[in-house]
Image: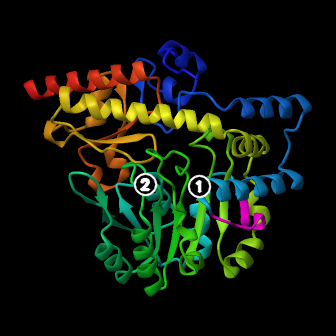
Amino acid sequence: MSFDTVTATQLRATGGLKWSKYPEALGAFVAEMDFGVPPAVTRALHGSVGSGLLGYLPSWLEQELQCATSEWMSTRYDWTIPPEDVLPTADVILACELALRVLTPPEAKVVVMTPAYGPFFGLSAVLGREVIEVPMIRDRQSWAVDLDGIAAAFRAGGGILVLCNPHNPIGKVYTRAELDAIAEIVDYHGGRVFADEIHAPVMYGGGRHIPYASISEIAAAHALTATSASKGFNLAGLKCAQIVVGNDADRRTLGRLHDYITHGCATLGAIATVAAYREGRLWLDEVVSYLEGNRDLVARMLPEIAPEIGFSHPAATYFSWLDVRPLRLDDPRSYFLHHAQVALSDGVGFGSVGQGHVRLNLAMPRPLLEQAVTAIAESAARSSAV
């Protein structure tokens, strides 16, 4: 499988958001990949469209999705979950909304380790929830969890921790020791954890994702997990995610809301997800290997041609978190869009610590990624010369 020959013209012609929103720029912002989907997914979707299976999610397909998700968790992450503990829903943000609305009291503040996925902040605002940011601790080689900061946030009224595992946008993979420490703090304070594990399929260097709820009965008792095939298999537009319930109380509470929770799950999304989980492993492994090469390309290029730009070496996800504070740009995203013709994600959207940062999407053909990094470096040099 080779993605190097795919051109920007071809990607723009497809019409996806990543390449149509800023048609004159290289698309490196929204979390989509430029590598298509597994052949098994294409076949499954063609079959469903051809047969007219386009209505509401049928019970038999919900059960297939539950079983396929359970199988995937077992084989990929060594996490054994009963199929009936899987609830289909539209997306991870809807699952997070459910956790906030249903599983926590209205006064509970939302604890977020930042930088973090931007829509969590917007959702909290819509629901009238205060967010307590706990910045990650950065050193030269890695990111560490501020455990004291998490404990302080719960003492200040935090009721639920939103855990990006793996962590978007910095690509951090949490260790077992870190997850155990987080679980101990949350349990002590009687809090909850919403575990967003949507990026778990993309792990580098043979790394293995550890689902938060799998580490102990204590963690499972206060966790609600949400995942999806949408990032690893490039299916974001098909609206199918999975909630994994870990305790009896949540089973009873969410069971009463079954029809509401599952209503937004698209039938075609479920078809595609079952095919991805059961027949897409080899495709995913090839894509992850290619992404790892892209990550390593950026790691080689930036220190040579733009040493002033800080680079986060991700252990997972297809993002690179770039620190451009030395450039003293008022609006880095806009600057690179207009001066490098590269569309990036604005760091401010990932929390207050994102000021002076941008997120680079690595999931593009390598020649285009090299072109994007070169353009970023050249425009950075021009900004320094002003």
The residue stretch that appears in magenta: 79-88
The kind of secondary structure element at disc 2 is loop
Badge 1 crowding class, 10 Å Cα cut-off, few under 14, some 14 to 19, many 20 or more, is many
Q: Earlier in the sequence, mark 1 or mark 2?
A: 1
Dot 1 lies on which element? Answer: helix
Q: Label 1, on which residue?
A: 92
Relative height, residue 44 to residue 122 (above, below) = above
Q: Residue at x 35, y 34 (%)?
A: 296
Q: Which mark is residue 264?
A: none
Residue in front for this viewpoint, 190 or 352? 190
86 in the magenta segment: yes
Q: Position of residue 337 (x, y in %)?
A: 32, 27
Q: Residue at x 30, y 26 (%)?
A: 373
Amino acid type of the residue that numbered disc 2 sits on in the rendered structure: His
Q: Amino acid at mark 1?
A: Val
Foreground: disc 1 or disc 2:
2
Q: Quadrant of residue 272?
A: top right
What's the mark number on residue 167?
2
Residue 224 location in percent, x, y? 59, 69
In this image, 143 relative to 263: left or right? left
